[in-house]
Image: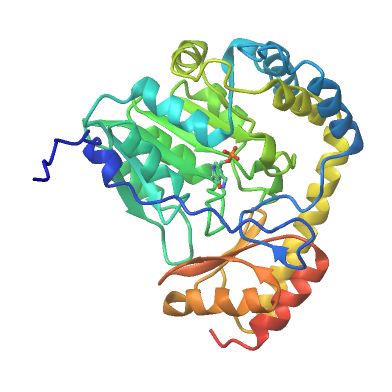
Amino acid sequence: IAVTRPQVPLRAAVADLPAYVPGARVPVGAAAYKLSSNENPFPPLPSVVAAIIDAAADMNRYPDMYATGLTEAIATSLGVAADAVVPGNGSVAVLGHVLAAVCEHGDEVVLPWRSFEAYPIAVALAGARAVAVPVTGDGRLDLVAMAAAVTGRTRVVLVCTPNNPTGPAVRSDELETFLAAVPSDVMVVLDEAYLEFVRDPAAPDGLAVHAAHPNVVLLRTFSKAYGLAGLRVGYAVARPRLARGIRAASTPFGVSHLAQMAAIASLRAQRELLERVDALVEERVRLLAGLRAQGWTVPDSEANFVWLPLGDRATSFAADAGRAGVLVRPFAGDGVRVSVGEREATDLLLELASTWRQ
Ligand code: PMP
């Protein structure tokens, strides 16, 4: 007789989680252009690789627990105090720590949608409830509706600027109006993962906004402009009291020694890395202009990707792109996000797009 024994239950929030599906991994040497994960197409600079190789000799030791050297290097480059900076294992992990630091069970987190896929997952894992506010038809955050969605249970509002996957950044004036409407005990997280790609003069200066509003926390990363996605380094900038809470909620030894050393070396090579960003921005402008010249209606992009609102045809477009050697990210029934990469990849993509009528 088979005896059914009780099973270990999963938390309901965890059992119900949607899977976070990152872009397919392309084998090294494969002919495909990978434009599916908003990565930097440039490999790390030789000086960064050298720092990683040097650091490898110390792998029998734990890393500096609080990444002191990296924290100071980030703080110096931003002109903020070191006790305002909290690094972590990629900014997505830092977001988890931010939410863990402030959300009680059942609290609400207001977020834009569609936006970064990891948001609803991070919110559910924190035991909080996601309140999703639709982005506008042209892919912009609706900050008026987001402010209106704040209730007495709201602990955090996530502002993704530029918004992944649609592309626009918020404007400084609309952000100020929003911040004036949100109570000062609600944390506002500005996720600036793509900050270095922003060229719109109307976009906010996150550091100035943070300086003026104690409830504003910045989230930044070395994964995009700095090209260290594989090493996982991101950080929060917050008032020291909040930063202490985020640090307390963080994974111990959460940033590896290799990652700390590579990020420090990248800050030293900042000028050269930001020149690469300029080249990627030029490529973005070319891709966007090329699509619009073909008659596509695409939102503005201030990031390293563009959004094709293909609706029901998103998945078939992505499959077609894959056959043409370009991996892109479909969001079924909604659109396709194409990262900006090599020139040849832009050319291939534009060629393909011309055969699709929107
Ligand atoms: N925020 C946004 C808006 C993103 O698009 C991403 C990466 N896709 C991240 C955060 C996470 O970056 P990381 O964990 O690599 O620092």
Q: Quadrant of the N terminus?
A: top left
Report x, y in % for residue 16: 27, 47
Report x, y in % for residue 213: 48, 24
Q: Residue at x 43, y 32 (%)?
A: 188
Looking at the image, residue 169 sits to the left or right of residue 70; the answer is: left
- Res 98 → quadrant: top left
Q: How many marks?
A: 0
Report x, y in % for residue 323: 65, 78
Report x, y in % for residue 216: 47, 27
- Res 220 → quadrant: top right
Q: Ligand 1: which quarter?
A: top right
Task: Determine whether 345 is above or below 172 in the image.
Answer: below
Does residue 335 show up? yes
Task: Determine whether 34 is above or below 348 in the image.
Answer: above
Q: Residue at x 68, y 70 (%)?
A: 326
Task: Determine whether 65 is above or below 42 in the image.
Answer: above
**216 or 222, which is in the foreground?**
222
Q: Residue at x 68, y 34 (%)?
A: 231
- Res 118 → quadrant: top left
Looking at the image, residue 116 sits to the left or right of residue 293; the answer is: left
**140 or 327, which is in the foreground?**
327
**82 or 255, which is in the foreground?**
255
Residue ranking furthest to the left: 1
Looking at the image, residue 358 sits to the left or right of residue 107; the answer is: right
Looking at the image, residue 209 sits to the left or right of residue 241; the answer is: right
